Image (tube, rainbow, N blue to C red):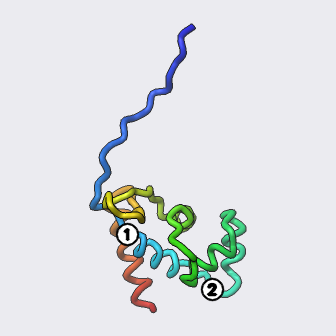
Amino acid sequence: MEVECPVVAPLPFPDLQLTVSYAEALCYAQGRLKMLGNGGLKPFCAAHQLTYPNIINLKNGKLKREEPRLLQRLLGCLAVPTELLHYPLASKTPCFLLPDAEALATFRDQLQFLTAQQ
């Protein structure tokens, strides 16, 4: 009996110009969460099945350690699809790879808006 293996596309080398740092992604996420206003965070967490205390700690900068997977999941809920990428290779904190130049430009524009509001 012959076993069929699924065809899997090869993994291309990532375009490193499409990456943002953990710090940039965190700043973006915190700014977006603050835009929800009073009473908006709990329903957002419930709708996206996010743990409310973790998201509050992330929003307020009180996480005990870096949480790249939580941040990646949150970015996805904020319509910012990313992949985690360990780059530079010596770094312990991954960066976030955006899908294309348009997504990166939008991210940078929105991050600039969010940081100007602080």
Distance from label 2 to label 1 (Cα)?
26 Å
Circle 1 SS class: loop
Query: For the C terminus, which image quadrant?
Result: bottom left
- At x 68%, y 75%, the residue is 53
Residue 46, by quadrant, is: bottom right
The answer to the question of whether label 2 and label 1 lie on touching residues, with beta carbons closer than 8 A, is: no
The 10 Å Cα crowd at callout 2, few under 14, some 14 to 19, many 20 or more, is few
Q: Residue furthest top?
A: 1
Name the residue that disc number 2 marks.
37
Q: Which x, y percent locates residue 32?
A: 52, 78
Return the disc, 2 or 1, that comes first in the chain's sequence.
1
The 10 Å Cα crowd at callout 1, few under 14, some 14 to 19, many 20 or more, is some
Query: Which kind of residue does numbered mark 2 sit on?
Result: Gly
Left or right: 96, with 15 as reference point: right
Between 103 and 55, the residue placed more toward the observer is: 55
Name the residue that disc number 1 marks.
21
Left or right: 36, with 93 as reference point: right
Circle 2 SS class: loop
- At x 29%, y 54%, the residue is 15
The tag on residue 43 is none
